[in-house]
Image (cartoon, helix red, strand yellow):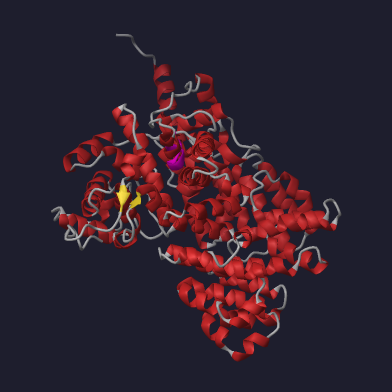
């Protein structure tokens, strides 16, 4: 055995101590970062300032500096803010801080500093900032005011709630005469239809603050407002009446339709206003799956209806088999919406059904539309493949990232910070940093090869949601190993086989529910991989005999899979094996699809497209498309989405519900 000298022993001891010291220092800095996160949440500015020096050199120092400076944006000097931005130049948190500062500068009307800082803002994804900037462009005559007015109007309409940026720009353009008053009323209509009263009030107040009390009364009781004798002779009657009937239609489309038949409103409302209101009434009736929805739509002109109204007209047309209405509604949509795979597909279906101008020409046009979207990427892309007679298969895998590409991803500062944040439990912060790095840091985001390497890095670290979402950004390459990963095989596959579930269906649902984030928690309290609600977990545990189940166990992956798959199987049995209805039940509760199935027998794709809730409609389509892709991966065989969709209609007479108390 080789002897070790005293000096060598001392050197080894010192090296070990240094390693321990480095580990301790890292652990101490990690703890300080978490301590700063709590201080930021509690608004403890002094604590943040005192703690910041202790995280110098830590990979998450830019995040810590953001927490320290963000609450001081309104009191710190511009130079102090710029010093912080310069210290962390190129990071997400620098750009996030500049975004917040620019919003503050806009609210403070500090336009000189705003214009100096705006060119340095990389994300360029904030509508309020765009509106401020456009307003300044018009004021400085850099862009014609009428051009600015059109752009501000579109940005303003897209804002969900009342804001300062786009409202300020709109007010300036209204005052200058470059934006018509009709634009503010249009904004009020959109907000009233979406039940966003602050936005309604803000838009109307920009025209005349004295009308605000009337708008409040309309929101509280539209029927009372419409019934008042004085209403017909008030100023701005037609605009306010339009808002009132829109509000009334939200809960009672039939009452709104009766109101529209009154002679006084027929005389006062313009063709455009009447068409818009009939669009709202038709949409609400279609969402309630009422057979008279198309009758309501027919009272208005498609060219005056909003894209959302036209989408519901098309859905009502599919449900009724009225393909001329489907064709006309799609033709009236904006170019942007008409180009979505959903409406490309349904335009093709309408052409085939109508056989216009003749069967051969219609088939050729439809096939060209299907060819333009056909792939394994999504629900309608897969249906387009099947319309062309092609099954859904796993596309050829792209060339894997090279060692150099992988090394570049591993060394990327933004991805390093994102991974470090997620390892510390700062998932929200890590996800934002990751998304910024792959999508927003550079114009257009990362290139295909960089995205594949970044996705590979996420997969290696089992950050499955980032693996999937990053890989899905590639426009050409389709790496299904990244897009449709199969973690926890040893739990999912045996469990699915044990209870008679298709493992592809289980994986398709988990991918949509949680993206395989084991500690995922929704805003309504659903937990874990399969996003099980606490009450549902307790009911299912009792149903399958898990007598020792405790609520905290739902976050354990194995337990979550056992309970989630059990509930899914119970739902599937209750809906006679219908995959779309069971998926809808899993997302929205079983009572709703039990109601939605009543009506005509429909192909599964038409039934799914007519689901009234946006979230559930998208969910069902995503789960079924996921399932088809997973089936192709697991079996290695061509697959059919349409076979999984089947047909949906009322429960057969005399068939007893298997689980009437299914929650």
Tell me the quadrant of the picture where the N terminus can be found: top left
Residue 194 appears in the picture as rendered:
no
Q: Residue furthest front?
A: 358
Residue 178: percent from left, percent from top: 80, 63
Q: What is the total number of numbered labels drawn onto the structure image?
A: 0
Say which quarter of the image contains residue 131.
Answer: bottom right
Say which quarter of the image contains residue 459.
Answer: top left
User: At 37% from the left edge and 53% from the top edge, which residue is drawn?
Assistant: 607
Tell me the quadrant of the picture where the C terminus can be found: bottom left
Residue 44: percent from left, percent from top: 54, 61
As drawn, 640 above or below 351: above
- 574 displayed left or right of 329: left
Say which quarter of the image contains residue 443.
Answer: top right
As drawn, 256 above or below 614: below
Foreground residue among 216 and 607:
607
Residue interval drawn in magenta: 376-382
Q: Residue furthest bottom?
A: 229
User: At 22% from the left edge and 57% from the top edge, which residue is drawn?
Assistant: 652
Residue 494: percent from left, percent from top: 20, 36
Foreground residue among 161 and 586:
586
As drawn, 483 above or below 235: above
Foreground residue among 474 and 573:
573
User: At 42% from the left edge and 57% from the top edge, which residue is drawn?
Assistant: 320
- 343 displayed left or right of 585: right
As drawn, 90 above or below 545: above
Residue 333: percent from left, percent from top: 59, 53
- 356 displayed left or right of 181: left
Q: Residue furthest right?
A: 141
Q: Is residue 398 magenta?
A: no
Residue 269 appears in the picture as rendered:
yes
- 485 displayed left or right of 280: left
């Amino acid at each position: 055995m080789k002897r070790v000298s005293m000096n060598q022993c001392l050197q080894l001891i010192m090296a070990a101590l240094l390693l321990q010291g480095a580990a301790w220092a890292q652990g101490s800095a990690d703890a300080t970062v978490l301590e700063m996160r709590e201080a930021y949440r509690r608004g403890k500015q002094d604590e943040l300032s005192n703690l910041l020096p202790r995280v110098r050199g830590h990979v998450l120092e830019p995040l810590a500096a953001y927490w320290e400076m963000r609450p001081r944006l309104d009191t710190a000097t511009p130079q102090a803010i710029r010093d912080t931005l310069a210290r962390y130049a190129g990071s997400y948190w620098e750009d996030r801080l500049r975004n917040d500062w620019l919003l503050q500068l806009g609210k403070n009307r500090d336009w000189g500093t705003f214009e100096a800082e705006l060119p340095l803002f990389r994300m360029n994804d904030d509508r309020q900032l765009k509106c401020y900037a456009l307003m300044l462009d018009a004021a400085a005559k850099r862009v014609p005011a009428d051009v600015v007015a059109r752009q501000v109007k579109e940005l303003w309409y897209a804002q969900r709630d009342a804001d300062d940026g786009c409202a300020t720009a709109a007010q300036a353009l209204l005052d200058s005469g470059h934006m018509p008053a009709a634009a503010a009323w249009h904004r009020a209509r959109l907000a009233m239809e979406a039940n966003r009263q602050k936005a309604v009030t803000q838009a109307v107040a920009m025209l005349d603050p004295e009308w605000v009390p009337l708008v409040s009364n309309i929101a509280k009781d539209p029927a009372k407002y419409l019934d008042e004798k004085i209403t017909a002779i008030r100023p701005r009657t037609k605009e306010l009446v339009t808002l009132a009937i829109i509000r009334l239609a939200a809960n009672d489309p039939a009452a709104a339709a009766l109101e529209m038949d009154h002679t006084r409103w027929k005389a006062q409302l313009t063709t455009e206003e009447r068409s818009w209101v009939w669009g709202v009434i038709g949409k609400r009736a279609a969402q309630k799956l009422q057979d008279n929805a198309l009758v309501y739509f027919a009272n208005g002109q498609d060219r005056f209806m909003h894209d959302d109204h036209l989408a519901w007209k098309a859905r009502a047309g599919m449900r009724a088999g009225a393909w001329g209405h489907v064709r006309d509604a799609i033709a009236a949509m904006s170019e942007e919406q008409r180009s979505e795979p959903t409406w490309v597909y349904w335009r093709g279906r309408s052409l085939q059904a109508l056989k216009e101008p003749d069967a051969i020409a219609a088939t050729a046009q439809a096939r060209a539309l299907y060819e333009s979207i056909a792939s394994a990427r999504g629900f309608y892309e897969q249906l387009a493949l099947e319309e062309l007679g092609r099954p859904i298969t796993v596309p050829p895998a792209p060339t894997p990232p090279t060692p150099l590409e992988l090394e570049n991803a591993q060394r990327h500062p933004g991805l390093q910070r994102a991974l470090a944040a997620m390892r510390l439990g700062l998932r929200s912060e890590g996800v934002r940093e990751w998304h910024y790095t792959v999508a927003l840091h550079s114009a257009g985001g990362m290139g295909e090869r960089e995205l594949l390497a970044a996705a590979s890095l996420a997969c290696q670290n089992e950050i499955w949601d980032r693996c999937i979402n990053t890989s899905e950004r590639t426009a050409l390459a389709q790496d299904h190993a990244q897009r449709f990963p199969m973690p926890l095989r040893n739990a999912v596959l045996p469990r699915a086989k044990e209870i008679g579930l298709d493992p592809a269906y289980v994986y398709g649902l988990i991918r949509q529910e949680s993206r395989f984030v084991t500690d995922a928690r929704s805003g309504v309290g659903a937990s874990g991989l399969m996003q099980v609600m606490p009450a549902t977990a307790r009911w299912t545990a009792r149903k399958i005999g898990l007598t020792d189940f405790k609520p905290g166990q739902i976050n354990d992956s194995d337990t979550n899979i056992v309970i989630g798959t059990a509930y899914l199987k119970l739902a599937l049995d209750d809906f006679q094996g219908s995959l779309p209805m069971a998926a809808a039940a899993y997302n929205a509760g079983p009572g709703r699809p039990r109601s939605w199935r009543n009506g005509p027998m429909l192909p599964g794709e038409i039934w799914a497209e007519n689901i009234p809730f946006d979230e559930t409609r998208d969910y069902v389509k995503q789960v079924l498309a996921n399932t088809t892709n997973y089936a192709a991966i697991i079996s290695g065989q061509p697959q059919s989405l349409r076979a999984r969709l089947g047909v949906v209609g009322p429960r057969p007479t005399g068939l007893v519900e298997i689980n009437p108390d299914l929650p």
